[in-house]
Amino acid sequence: MEWSHPVGVWVGAIGTLALFSLIYRENRLYRLFEHLFIGLAAGYTIKAVWTETLRPQWWVPMTSEGRWPWVFALFGGALFYTIFTRKYNWMSRISIGALLGFAAGQSFQATANVYIPQIRGSFKALWVTRDMLPPGSLVTPLGQSLNNILFVVIIVSVMTYFFFSFEHRNKALMTTARTGRLMLMFAFGAIFGSTVMARMALLIDRVWFLMNKWLGIG
Amino acid sequence: MHSMNLQRLLGSAFPKASGSWIWISILLAALGCVVVFFALQALPGRARKFLIAAVTFLAGLFYAAEFFLPVDPKTDENFLTFAVPTVGNVINVLAAFTLGLGVFSLVRIHGTKVVKLREGWENSVVLLLGIVVMAVAGLEFEDTRFYRSLFRDVLNSFDAAMFATLAFFIISAAYRAFRVKSAEATLLMFAALIVMLGQIPIGQYLTHWLPEKGSYASLFRLDNISNWLLITVNAPAIRAIGFGLGIGGLAIAMRLWLSLERGAFFEAKADN
Amino acid sequence: MSNPLQRLESIDRRILYAVLLIIVVVGLLVPIPLPLAVGPQARGVYEAIENADPGKIVIVSTLWSASTQGENSPQTRVILQHLMRKRLRFALIAFGDPQSTTLAQELAEELARENSYEYGKDWINWGFRADIAGTLKGLVKDINETIKTDSIKKRPLSEYPVMQGIHNVKDVGVIAEVSASGNYVSWLGLVVGSTNAPFCYAPTSVMAPELYTYLDSGQMKGMLFGIKGAAEYERLLGIRGFTTRAITPVSLSLVLLFVLIGLGNYGMYAAKKRDQKGANG
């Protein structure tokens, strides 16, 4: 079955233009379509939560497979909603606490698995010989040594920049921290450039929708 | 062995029901929940705080113990591992219930706005209609072209358009704010320029006549310079930030787990 | 009266918007045939799929909505195209935003028709999960028990031929996530250490620079750098899809950005010079 219909495309295109009108100035048409968008998104959340999670993972096991203890999950879930009442809102903290606890418990494994390879990978050989290079590598041992030295220097200098346990008065420490600050600027520059690229891709997608799917150009 | 015992114990404590016993069991369990609800409300303030801390701790203890306790080398499991999928499903269901909080809040705020005919109530009507139409179409008419088009052509278009407007703002902001006034700003701009030029075809075209690899001249190709900068300069800087984030994240996790965290949520009184 | 060069510092924003829009439209209509070098990151994803064990299943995890479909949709598309070309069986799973599961399913259905891929036999949709960490921990232990039913027909996973011999993440050949969020931490922290399956990531461009550290440590085997990564992958697959067309306006808009930054700085420099001249007499 098709995922698209000409009427839907027209509504989508008009809505896209109305939402784009914000870049000129705030207006009533923008507000209207903004509210429609939020409404549709909230409606979709209801649909998706029920059909994707609650029905298959909670309702069906409870009512069709005889796993009645799932009713306690409803109790846990309902406690979240006590947040909207003055008298019972403390109870929402039981369920919120459970979710926070689960997340905290998982963080031990997650932190170890994410950062131990990172720490291990930071101890790079500062003097690389030819037999240490992967087969087929086009980098010279000297080039790789310089790369590794630079890599380690940057890690140390950026970590020094973030080291706030005592004041940076020592000149060597100040220079290292300053180097770290400059390297951070470099990383942020790379992230900034990529952010622009990402935003452009989103605009291109919309313009292509209007041109191709709506107006049939291209 | 231990895991089998625990599994059996849980199985006998909560036996599977069949036939009409399913609904009877559900009803009885629901009644039990109602009793627990009022029993909880009868607790004094200190006991409530203790209960919240205990639930938080026990929830965290499950995954912490499952990770730290030694495993049977034959099965690679310990006595808690069998429960991991079920506990994961419980969290999943609980998390799904939380998604409704936002919708509930929206309906409450905009419903009030419509009933009291406050300014902008017309927009609130559209919002509430949007919720109803999408939810009904999705739940009752999922396999129709109407629902599919409503999702793909309308909702997706609006969502994508909202974010696409950022492209205009970022161009304008970069033009106005990106002034070279210090060494840091210069480096930031230089990095953005070189990295991006090396990533896009127009930038790559400027040095495309140089060999791609296998020669010292290839080091001067913009795509190779960009890649080298990302791997050798950007990666260690990000890694160093990551180390700080990792330690900080673990510290916060410990404070949450042991209910040592301070702030509005954790210090709120529980004796309404 | 300020001279025209100084006015470069304060061009009306509506003029900037109009120029940007014109550049995007022209770029889409007249793609410039320029070379695009395929980086080692995209090659890493390609090789991971190319060398995947056909006896195992590939997990394609998605965490994106229409808001980032400009980048994430082409990324998902090229990965699925490659999987189908290699005749590898795969499972879709979605986190974070429920739109993700439907959008990925739509792409898979479209490509499955073109590649004669049968649902349930060659691919399956495990659906959306509200909680990431708990689900991933469950997948490590038991996929059937964690996922239970598929998203389309709502039948137990064990009934599908595509799931035959698949019990936990040890039976997974490649894990590829297309994401608009930092979900890689969960995959790296809770799954990657428990399986030999290479982990590949396809983030939006915003996130890409921060992931090079994981490529360096070998925790990630490859990465698709936003829309550019998808365009590189199209080159590797030898196809000319939407990203090959879209990379021209991406390039042009970035050039516009650099020109505008240059003009703004030149305007600032000219204004400073004028002020200095005024102060000197």
Image (spheres, rainbow, N blue to C red):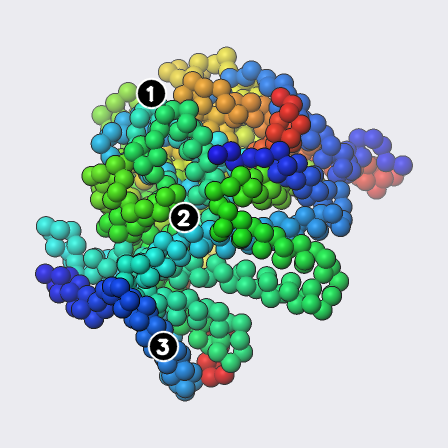
- Check disc 3 and report the residue beneath it: B31
User: Circle 1 is placed at which residue position?
Assistant: A138
Q: CA distance from mark 3 to mark 1?
A: 72 Å
**Residue B84: x percent and y percent?**
26, 57
Neighbour tally class for label 3: few under 14, some 14-19, many 20 plus, Cα within 10 Å:
few
Q: Amino acid at mark 3?
A: Leu
Q: Nearer the viewer, residue B222 or C280?
A: B222
For disc 1, the chain is: A
To which chain does the residue with label 2 belong? C
Determine which quarter of the picture holds residue A60. Answer: bottom left
Q: Is residue C255 found left or right of B27 in the rendered image?
A: right
Q: Are marks 1 and 2 in contact (CB under 8 Å)?
A: no
Image quadrant where one finds the N terminus of chain B: bottom left
**Residue B189 visible somewhere in the drawing:** no
Determine which quarter of the picture holds residue B68.
Answer: bottom left
Measure the C-alpha gap from mark 1 to mark 2.
44 Å
- Residue that carries the numbered disc 2 in the rendered image: C128
